[in-house]
Image (cartoon, rainbow, N blue to C red):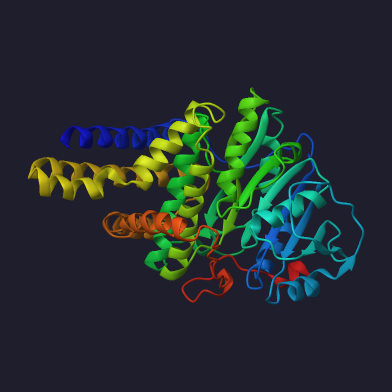
Amino acid sequence: MIYATLVLFSLFILFQLLYIFIPLFSGKGRSEGIKLLEEKEFSILIPAFNEEKTILNCLQGIVNLGYSNYEAIFINDGSSDQTMKVLYEYLDLKPIQRTPTQIGQHEPARGFYQSANFPRVFLLDKENGGKADALNAGIAYSKKSLIITLDADSILAPDALAAMNTSFEDEKVLAAGGMIQISQGFTGSHIKPKPVFNLPGIIRYQIIQYLTDFYLHKTTQEKLKSITVIAGAFGAFRRHALLEINGYRKTVGEDLDITLRIHKLIKTKYKKHKLIFVPQALCYTECPSSYKALFSQRFRWQRGFIDCLLHFRKSYFTNLGFPVSIYLLVDSLILGTLNAYPTILIPIILLFTKNYSMALFFLSFTFLLALFRSIMALLVAGRFGHVYSRKDLLKITLFVPFEILTYRLLGLVFVTFGTILYFKDKDVWNNVDRIGTNKQSYGEGIMLNRKEVG
């Protein structure tokens, strides 16, 4: 028991040290001005199901891009709310003809439209089929060589495409993930947002988690060639790669699934190609603001992980390669899902070995490591312009120790019940209700200026 505990705890420490020190010494930072040698062409795909409260925020980010060589395709996936009406009102849509490319399987289209107000913006109206289905339809109707996938509650920063464009100057880049930040954690417009921390605890918890997951984890995984998820909220792919793997598979974890399938494509056909993380490419997304919505989202994430873990079970260490397999099986499964450290191990040690000194050591060391990791996340984030005021830094300093001992324990609930729910009913989606960050009572979020969108 003790030896197994020590081995698992050692693995935990190893991964945490990698996540801390690789980003710390990577030397990356946000450039003040991103120079474009040539604008590559992008198709931005935005699947939308019942997004009437957030869709205009997404639209604002699109029309205010400091970029011209793109098309944006909103994909109405059979919404039952006012999503179509809102888009009609602000876009002034006109029906046009476009012949789709054959890819995967998706529900039939009901119409394809172009905006009279913004000629680079289109709408694909289709029968409901789920997010993966909507993305396949979007790929079929897209015309550009690079594909951006964007959630309907996400707002692109003005230079987001410019940053992605620079990354795809490297012909070996097959796919890239952008930096996702929580929109409720900012005030002002999306053009010059200011980070704030005067928020409810449930939002603060997710802000700390996102900063850690992206600035530390994604940076480390890129260095070790082991990016396991290009987040569906903002990712970029070469269109020919998506066509070669026949688009998205219907699963609740479509972003994890497509990333792993791109890895298989690299392993079997494009051996010198790679996946990267582009922290300079920013987008802002609305996070759950209630425990019910948070649980629903995280249960879905865990169900998607379990589905992909089983789906790719024959590919580990072969078609997926060693680094990706290690991160999936050790970091995500053993240390992440099984959660053998330290929350479960400490009670076991106390109950069966009565080794209180070891239990106290595990608890103290884990707490200090988590605290140090959060500090490093803030430090690395600061290199990219994510800088808090002194007042907010004090709030963060007081909140993080509390968060480690309280909110972070929710991870056990997420992985436990998410796994159970997968085996109970793996096809249920669990949508997260949106409320629109510009309507928050606790902060303005990123405000939508309707004059900018017509």
The x and y percentages for residue 242 are: 71, 41
Let me know if residue 194 appears in the view. Answer: yes
Could you say which is closer to the camera, residue 410 or residue 153?
410
**Count of numbered tags:** 0
Could you say which is closer to the camera, residue 71 or residue 312?
312
The x and y percentages for residue 98 are: 90, 55
Q: Is residue 105 left or right of residue 273?
A: right
The x and y percentages for residue 384 are: 53, 44
Q: Residue at x 77, y 64 (%)?
A: 126
Q: Residue at x 68, y 27 (%)?
A: 172
**Residue 171 in which image quadrant:** top right
User: Which part of the image, by quadrant, shows the N terminus?
Assistant: top left
Taking the view exactly as shown, the residue that stands out farthest to the right is 97
The x and y percentages for residue 263 are: 59, 33
**Residue 79 in which image quadrant:** bottom right
User: Which part of the image, by quadrant, shows the C terminus?
Assistant: bottom right
Q: Residue at x 45, y 60 (%)?
A: 424
Could you say which is closer to the camera, residue 144 or residue 385?
144
Q: Residue at x 92, y 58 (%)?
A: 97
Above or below, 159 against 134 in this view is: above
Above or below, 397 against 364 in this view is: below
Could you say which is closer to the camera, residue 446 or residue 436?
436
Q: Is residue 200 left or right of residue 351?
A: right
Let me know if residue 382 appears in the view. Answer: no
